[in-house]
Image (cartoon, rainbow, N blue to C red):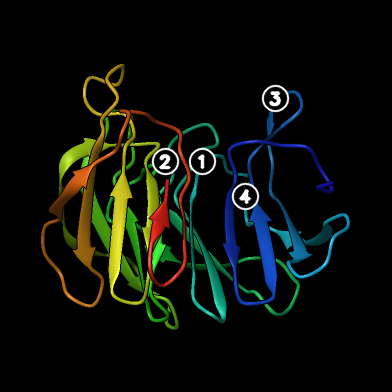
Amino acid sequence: DLTVGRRSGCGMSNQTRGVIAGGIASGPSVSDVMDYITIATTGNATDFGDLTAGTQEPAGINSPTRGVIAGGANPGVSNTIEYITIATTGDATNFGDLTVAQQAAGGSSSSTRGLIMGGMRPANNVTIDYITIASTGDAVDFGDLSVARAYNGTVSNSIRGVTAGGNANPVSLNTNSIEYVDIATTGNANDFGDLYVATRVIHGASDSHGGIS
């Protein structure tokens, strides 16, 4: 079990530990809680610390060292970026700002760079931002998606970031589009293919060879 039941947070991990940050708890109230688990074991989550402010629907990014929580809403849409050191516990620290405030974006990363892909503010958008995870500072424009989307699933390896599905515009329309970027460069996203079914509010998981949305 989590320490607090909630939805619409984000997740980050290194090779040993997973961290669950923010979300909507009962009430509904927007939570600033962060929990952690040791992935190789089973058992209840343990309190990690607190975000600087409660947030829902942020993007989660990680390197082997840091976890980054980007954007979200409480209740207005936020441009805030925060970070934690995954191997320790403690409260999140301010990292910088996104180029635009947004929630429900997809986060993907290599070991050095993190991408925030899409999102809504409140209309869905094509923005891709990037940060250098080991540093602090404001996000920088990376390029654009070809399809505006929010609530999109993202996967990545050390080379590519891939985003799939989500709300398009108008927000009632779901997309089956899959796009990719080369994380180490900048530029607009490229067509990858299509999901089997157009869908939204999906999550992604990946190893170094493939991804699942």
Residue hosting label 1: 57
Residue 41 location (% of width, % of height): 82, 67
Q: Secondary structure at mark 2?
A: loop
Q: Earlier in the sequence, mark 4 or mark 2?
A: 4
Which mark identifies residue 103?
2
Residue hosting label 4: 53
Q: Secondary structure at mark 1?
A: loop
Q: Residue at x 69, y 76 (%)?
A: 16
Q: Earlier in the sequence, mark 1 or mark 2?
A: 1
Question: Of the residues tagged 4 and 3, which is closer to the observer?
Answer: 3
* Residue 190 located left or right of residue 90: left
State how far apart marks 2 and 3 are (Cα).
Answer: 17 Å
Amino acid, disc 2: Gln
Residue hosting label 3: 28
* Residue 42 located left or right of residue 27: right
Amino acid, disc 4: Ala
